[in-house]
Amino acid sequence: MELVKGPTYSHEEMLAHMVAEYEVILLRTCYMYLHDKALAEDATQETFLKAYKALDSFRGESSEKTWLMRIAMNTCRDMKRSAWFRYMDRSVEIERLPLPAKVFEFMEADDLTQAILKLPTKHKEVILLHFYQDMTMREIASVLDISASTVQKRVKAACSKLKKMLGKEDFYES
Amino acid sequence: MNHEKMREHVHTGIDRQCASLTSDPYRVQRVLNMAHEAPGTGGFIVKKKMSAGLIFAIVMMLLTVTAVAAVLLNLHIEKAMDIAVDKGEFTEWELDDKIALINAMTEAGIPLPQDKLSVIGDADSSDEERDRAATEILVDIYGNEEHISHFTIASHDWGDPFQWTLEQQVWFWETLREKGLYTGKIKYLLPGENDLTRDQVVRIAKKTIQDAYDLPEEIVQAYDADVTFFTIEGTDVAPRWRVYLGYVNAEAAEYTVLLTRDGQVTEDASLYIFKPGVSVTSAPQNDQPSTVLKPYEKRLLATEELYLSHRNMQYHFLSNCPSVEAEVLSATDNIDGYEPCPYCVLQTQLWSVEDKIIYGVMYGELPTEAVISASQAEQIAIDYLLSYGMDDIINLIPYSRYLTIDNQCQYTVFFARLDNGQIAPIYSVIVDAKTGKVLSTFDPTANGLG
């Protein structure tokens, strides 16, 4: 569902719509980016706050989702650059989340998630946006402010890394 | 695997593993509260416009000033902080704000392009033209306008924040704190006359890791040091030094040494304890840079074993520290193409809250004196779950974190089991840290208890 900007929607209604539509997927994307539940909560909150404050300037040149993801990615990047982030050991953060029991049919997907967490940031970004946020190369290019061909190269490189990490011959070929 | 299958696996994997990250029913209200609390968000503040001629005169006059007092060097950074307090992010700034920053930069002696300054000072320029010129000046120096902030300005002008001097650290973070822009628990301090100097502390830290890991001197001397003298805000934790040694290259191990005020290396940062027996024969095939994992000796689960989670670091120790021997404790992360991981993961979850904050794990906050202790919260959680007949928690490891969320102090008490050396939380209980009342519980196998 896309917002139709017009006099029938107040800013509060637009915010409520965005939260209802994108909160969980944004929260989980931020978590995959930052490896920290509290920071992911902060990043999600910050994203909606920035979006709310910037609703007047949102001209609809990109989709609402692309716009929100762009804010979210920039917010996550800012957090990663913050002074204390580099001091943290985030290698075990996902183990802190209470996990559902391992079920055989999900093991492959769980292994893939763990491998994605280990990707360098620039590769992780494109994988999350392409396969989790279901965005096209062009949309990702708009979010990350890079060319679509660069996005394509990064997706290819990321998939190659994942294939190597998971040791699967039949892994996805982009 | 085709695209659809890949997409399905990514969705399934992330949604399963992040199942506990769900929507916040108060999200909209929180955002609205923050938006209405934040200055400058209820509509733009229109300041009285300075005349273009006056701006130009000020800029030109300041450009001719040759002697800039040292105190002025931070002026533009503080100006950026003040504007952030008032207006928030750079994208929200108005023309007057940008000009105020540019004037402060000029006062700080930063050379600026004359052509763009002329546009700003030209009485015939429109506001749009002046705004464009002002934005271009700032973007040319400090990068993408979405990222311009007091932090990026300081990072540009002073260099990598991890290389800032002690004076810069104290000035930056404590000025931010005064303005309400930094609420972190780390309180940066300046050493007094009778304290050690930065150089002395770095020498002690380098000697410590050289001796501890039997490293060649030339390797140790190649390390750059990031030094912090700090305490924990709101506590009586004695001031101490932290020396981070790194920056050699992406593959090199990084070290952090903690020292007391008088230069004694604290036991928690001194030595690893390895078990005898293993040899690693080849470098890991991992092309990712090392994660920041600091060498701490911790007595974990009463074993006094040290666990490293990153292969590069393990390889570094095993190949560069001839005195070190180790054995495979468990292959926790045995992915094809990599060497088996010879150690378990550093179990920082089990550290005390104070240790987590002091040693930079930064997970949670220090409880205040006015609230119940972590052990009391854990006991309340145990009693609560037992009252529901959940006797299996007796065999689980409790640990907790303390956080203040929306002015409510709370402990989240986790109950975990050790799974191949990994901490695997099974249940969590949130306890009000003031009243001891159980606020909510999470049981992933039963979709919640309360």
Image (cartoon, coloured by chain):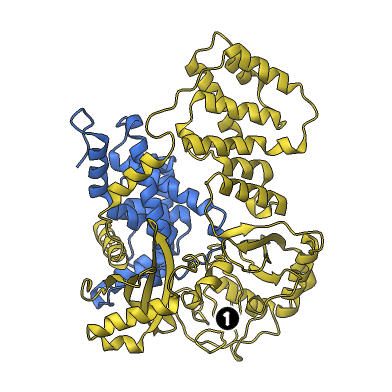
B355 horizontally vs B193: left or right: left
Q: Quadrant of residue B207?
A: bottom right
Residue B333 appears in the figure? no
Q: Quadrant of residue B215?
A: bottom right
Please report, as a chain letter, where disc 1 is located: B
B284 horizontally vs A155: left or right: right
Instruction: Please provide percent x and percent y for residue A130.
Output: 33, 51
Under circle 1, the secondary element is loop
Report the front residue among B81 and A84: B81
The C terminus of chain B lies in quadrant: bottom left
Instruction: Please provide percent x and percent y for residue A14.
Output: 24, 39
For the point 24% across and 44% down, the residue is A16
What shade has chain B been given?
yellow
Instruction: Please provide percent x and percent y for residue B336.
Output: 43, 75
Answer above or below: position of B85 versus B438: above
Q: Quadrant of residue A74?
A: top left
For the point 44% across and 37% down, the residue is B39
What shade has chain A been given?
blue
For the point 25% across and 61% down, the residue is B8
Q: Name the residue under label 1.
A: B298
Report the front residue among B242 and A2: B242
Report the front residue among B431 and B360: B431
B145 horizontally vs B396: left or right: right
